[in-house]
Amino acid sequence: MVHRFAQFWFLALVVLALQGCPATNPVREAQTLDQKGYALYGMFVVFEEQAASLKLQGVLSESAQDKIREIDGKAKPLADKLLDALTEVSTIRRALEKGESTQEKLQIAVANLDQWILNAEPEITALINFVEKN
């Protein structure tokens, strides 16, 4: 429970950093793989919300809305899998601390997380770039 609370606050801080300082890239600033994953997911959440806001404000052309739907359609499933992988790593770490898991399981989960970050980053970056240009 405490670990989940810490994850929430880390993600909240990422979101605040993104909103308050657009020049900051938390993915580049991340010092661990977990931080990079949460930063990337946080960026997805912020920019997906900005895309929805732009649409609601009526400032996007029909073609821009179509493009955002296309980009988001690629990014969202990957972002969801990224969050699943982050949760799995966190769960295994807690279990390992209690002696209820193995280092091998953690290594597999971390490798899986690394792969989801690699898969998700280009699609999330495409969403970010498109929203920033509009």
Image (spheres, grey):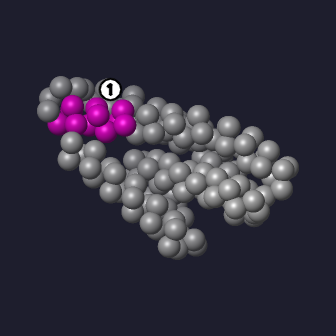
Q: Quadrant of the N terminus?
A: top left
Of residue 67 and residue 128, the one placed in the foreground of this image is: 67
Identify the secondary structure beneath mark 1: helix
Q: Is residue 70 above or below residue 131?
A: above
Residue type highlighted by circle 1? Lys
Q: Is residue 130 above or below residue 4?
A: below
Residue under circle 1?
105
Q: Is residue 40 visible?
A: no
**Most distant residue in the left direction:** 98
The percent coordinates of residue 51 (x first, y second) are 66, 55
Image point (44%, 61%), residue name:
14
Image point (84%, 50%), residue name:
62
Q: Is residue 73 above or below residue 9?
A: above
Magenta stretch: dominant SS? helix
Relative to 28, 107 lies left or right? left
Of residue 5 and residue 54, the one placed in the foreground of this image is: 54
Tell me where residue 90 sits by quadrant: top left
Relative to 74, 9 lies left or right? left
Image point (39%, 28%), residue name:
108
Q: Label 1 neighbourhood size at 10 Å, few (<14), some (14-19), many (20+)?
A: some
The percent coordinates of residue 59 (x first, y second) are 76, 62
Q: Which residues are magenta?
A: 87-97
Q: Quadrant of the C terminus?
A: bottom right
Q: Is residue 102 magenta?
A: no
Q: Is residue 89 magenta?
A: yes
Q: Is residue 17 visible?
A: yes
Tell me where residue 61 sits by quadrant: bottom right
Image point (50%, 48%), residue name:
41
The percent coordinates of residue 88 (x first, y second) are 36, 32
Q: Is residue 65 above or below residue 13?
A: above
